[in-house]
Image (spheres, rainbow, N blue to C red):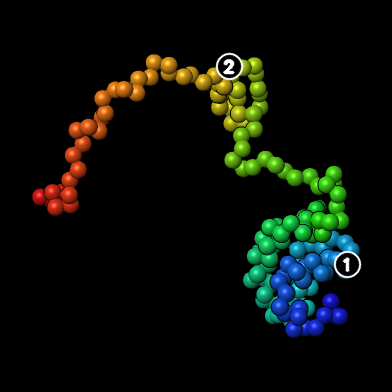
Amino acid sequence: MKEIKKEEVENLSYKDITFMILDKEKKGINTLELFTKIVSILELPSSTIENKIGDYYTSLTTDKRFILLDGVWDLRKRHTSDKIIVDSIEEDDIELDEIKDDNEIIEDEYGDEYTDDVDVDDDFDDTTDDDLADLVVLDEEDLSE
């Protein structure tokens, strides 16, 4: 980082400076250590660490150049895809504890039971009288009376 002028470094984002630090270090570094180095390089007050480290962490998680492994950040390009394990289960996903044959009961992780048999009402008649045919629309003036 010493070969880059201070003015140029000040114009870089925290993520770009992080990339340069990790590229130079050749090893992973934890969030606090990385951000402390950035604050030092940019000669920012130490209170910046406490005030902005959460935003910094979030910005690293959204940048595809970085990967968090065992609590340390590293460059994704250093890791082959067989070393990266991504937890693909979202918070809203339901894990099925037990799956049986078609039309049988399926139980989710909360013990709720579902069937995958969908009842279709073949007798549905969409030619019934329109329930809204007698609908009357009132103006605001009519409502106040």
Q: Position of residue 39 (x, y in %)?
A: 74, 76
The residue lying at 14 percent from left, 52 percent from top is 141
Element under disc 1: helix
**Mark 2 and mark 1 in contact (Cβ < 8 Å)?**
no
For the residues labelled 1 and 2, the Cα–Cα distance comes to 57 Å
Farthest residue, direction right: 26
Mark sitting on residue 25: 1
Q: Look at 75% across and 69% down and name the residue there.
A: 16
**Residue 78 position within the rendered picture, expressed as x and y whole percent measured from the top left:** 86, 56
- Tell me where residue 123 sits by quadrant: top left
Exactly how many numbered labels are in the figure? 2
Q: Is residue 12 left or right of residue 51?
A: right
Disc 2 secondary structure class: loop
The furthest residue to the front = 127
Q: What numbered label is drawn on residue 103?
A: 2
Q: Residue at x 18, y 52 (%)?
A: 140
For label 1, the crowd category at 10 Å Cα-Cα, with few meaning under 14, some 14 to 19 and many 20 or more, is few
Please name whichever residue, 94 or 47, is drawn nearer the observer in this view of the structure.
Answer: 94
